[in-house]
Image: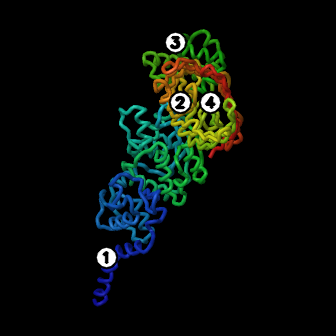
Amino acid sequence: MSNSLRIGPAVLWLITSLPLQAQAQTAESSLHLDPAWLTLIHYQPDRFGSGYTSQADDPAFFLSEGGKNSPKAELEATLKAIQQPGDGNDHARCRFPARDAWLREQLDLPTQATDCPDYKEWMNTLNTESITLVFAASYLNSPSSMFGHTFLRLDPPQDDEQTNLLLANTISYAADAAAHDSELLFAYRGIFGGYPGITSVQPYYEKIRLYSDIEHRDLWEYKLNLNQQEVDFMLAHAWEIRDRNFDYYFFDENCAYRLLALIDVARPGTNLLGEVSTHAIPSDTVRWVVDKDLVENVHYRASAATSVSHSLSALPQPHQTLAAAMANGYVEPDSGEVLALPPRERAHLLDATYDYVRYQSEADSWPREFAAPLSHSLLRERSKIDGAAALEEPEEPKVRDDQGHDTFRVSLGAGQLAHREFTQLTFRPAYHDILDPPAGYRSGAQLQFLRLDARYYTDNDELQVEQLTGVEIRSLSPRNAFFSPLSWQVGFGGRRTDTGNKRVLAPYLEGGAGGSWRLGQQTQAFAIATADLEIDDDLRRGYDAAPGADIGLLHQNNRFSLAAGAKTKAWIVSSQHRQDQVYAKGNWHIGREFSLFAEFTREDHYDRYQSTWQAGLHAYF
C-alpha cells in the first residue's frame, strides 16, 4: 500500500511536468532556428535586420499572434497546443500534423493516438505511394503560363502496370484570380502581388485535359525518389497549407516556388529554395530538382496537338493534301482516290485524318453536325482494313525543357553607331529570345523580361541606357494546310529614339500580328504588320505613332541561329516620315553556357543613312 502511495504522485508529477520540460528544453535550445522548422512555417530571413518573416499571409496558419515574425513564439505556441488534451478536427494536432510529428520527434515526446476524421479521410483518399513532379511546357497565349507550369502528381501504389495514373490526384499552387479578370489585368496583378495563391487538389486527368488537350502543352513527368515517410510528411504539410493564403507573384512566389518548399519540407537539407534569387522560373526549378538527385526517372507525355502534328507530318506530301481535303469535306473517305491507295497507306491516312478531325472538334470547336458524320465515315472506312499497324507515337524530344540554356543572360559586346564606337553590357534576368540556343525551348518563341542594355561611348566617355525592356514577347508559329496559328508580338519599355537632332530615351509600346511559313525543318519566313507608339517631351506633340511591317527569315539549330529581314515604319503624328531598316543577326552557340553574337543594321531615318554593328559574347547562368 505504501509503495502505491509513493508511485501515484510520481506518475502524476511526470505527466504534468512533461510539457514544462519540453518548453524548458526549447527555451534553452535554438530549436526554433532549426532549418526544418523555418521551412515548415515558411520563414525567410529579413532583408534588413536579423529577424525572420513567414511568407504565409493567412492568420489561420499561425498559432501565435506574433507567429508571422517570431519562429520562437510560433514554436512555443505550437508545442503548447499539441499537448492540450482532446482531439477532433479543430485540435492543433489535426490542423498541423506535420508540425506535430516533427516536434514529437525532436523533443522525444510520447506518441499519442488522436482522432482526426477529416485528415484521415483526406490521406486515405489520396492513397499516395510516390510523388511525381510534372512540368507543363510554356504557353505564350496566356500570361500565367508563359514560363511553363509545375505541379505534383500523387501516385497511388503501383499494384501492376495497368494502374491508371490518370485517376491520380495532383497538388498545385496558383493565383486565386477572378474569372472575369482580363489577361492584361491578370498579368499586372500577378507581377505586383494582387492575388492570393491557393494550394489545391485536382485529378490528373483534369490537368491533362487543360494543359495537353486544350492548351497544346507537352507534359514532362519527373518521378521523385522520396521514400514513404517523406511522402507522408509532405502530404501532412500540404494539409496544413491547403486553402491558406500565400501572396502570389509571377516571378518568385509562384507555382514552382511553392512546390520547391514542399519538397524541402519532405526532405530537409535539400534547400531548393536557396537556389532562388530574383525569380523562380518553372523550367529552372525543375533543373534544380534534377541537379539535387531527387529524380528517379522521367516520362514524356505529348500533347494532343503534338500527336496530331506528328501523325500528319509522317504522311507523304500528296497524302497530306488528301487528308486536308477529306478533313474539310472536299473528298469523301470512300472516294476513288482514297480507295486506290495500298491498305497500309490508306489506314495511316484515315487514322491521321480522324485524329485531326477529333482534335479540331475539341480544340477549335468544329460544329458537331459536321465533325460527327465525318468522324463516323473515317472510322467506317478504317474498320474495313485489317492488319495495318497503328500510327507511331511522337518521339521524345532529344533535349528536355530543363536541359536547355539557363534563363539569366549577361552579354558583353563592342560595336559602332555611325562613327561612334561603344561597348555594351546587357543584363536579362529572363528568359529566351529567338536567337538563343533553341534546344529545350519552343521554336520561334521569344519572351524577355526586364532586359537592360547600357552603352559606354568612347568618343566622349558617355554612359547611356540604350534600352530598358519591360516585356517583349514574340510568337512565330508556322502555318500549314492543317493549322493556321497567328504569329504575333508585343513589347513595352524605354528605348533610344532619333528625334531628328538628338537621340533620347523614350517610353514605347509596340505590337504586331501576321503569319509565318516553314521553308524547311529549321527555317521559316514571316511577315508581321506592326504598330509603334513612342512618348517623349522632345517629340513635337509629345508622342508619335507608326504603322509598319517586318518581313524576314529565321533559322534555328543547335549550332547557330540567324535572323535577317527588313522593317519599315511610317511615323504619322509628330513627324511625317518613313523609317526603313535592313538587319541581320546571328548567334553561334557554344554548348548551353555561351553564344557568340554579331548583328548589323542599315537604317534610313530622317533622310540619313547610318549603320550599326555589334559583336560579343552571351553567357547564360
Which quadrant of the structure image shows residue 323? top right
Q: Secondary structure at mark 2?
A: helix
Q: Nearer the viewer, mark 4 or mark 1?
A: 1
Residue type at mark 1 is Thr
| Residues at marks 1 and 2, CA–CA distance in whole angstroms | 63 Å
Q: Which residue is mark 3?
A: 329
Identify the disc placed on residue 304: 2
> Considering only order in the chain, which callout, 2 or 1, is on the residue closer to the N terminus?
1
Q: Nearer the viewer, mark 1 or mark 3?
A: 1
Identify the disc placed on residue 392: 4
Q: Is residue 42 above or below residue 7?
A: above
Q: Is residue 504 above or below residue 70?
A: above
Labels 1 and 2 touching (C-beta < 8 A): no
Q: Residue at x 63, y 27 (%)?
A: 389
Instruction: State the image coordinates of residue 615 (x, y, percent, origin top left).
Output: 70, 36
Q: Which residue is mark 1?
A: 16
Residue type at mark 4 is Glu
Instruction: State the image coordinates of residue 401 (x, y, percent, origin top left).
Output: 59, 40
Instruction: Classify mark 1: residues with Cα within 10 Å, few (<14), some (14-19) or many (20+).
Output: few
Nearer-the-camera pick, 372 or 461? 461
Labels 2 and 3 touching (C-beta < 8 A): no
Left or right of 600? Residue 34 is: left
Which quadrant of the structure image shows residue 316? top right
> Considering only order in the chain, which callout, 3 or 2, is on the residue closer to the N terminus?
2
Q: Is residue 268 above or below residue 477?
A: below
Q: Secondary structure at mark 3?
A: loop
Q: Residue furthest top?
A: 336
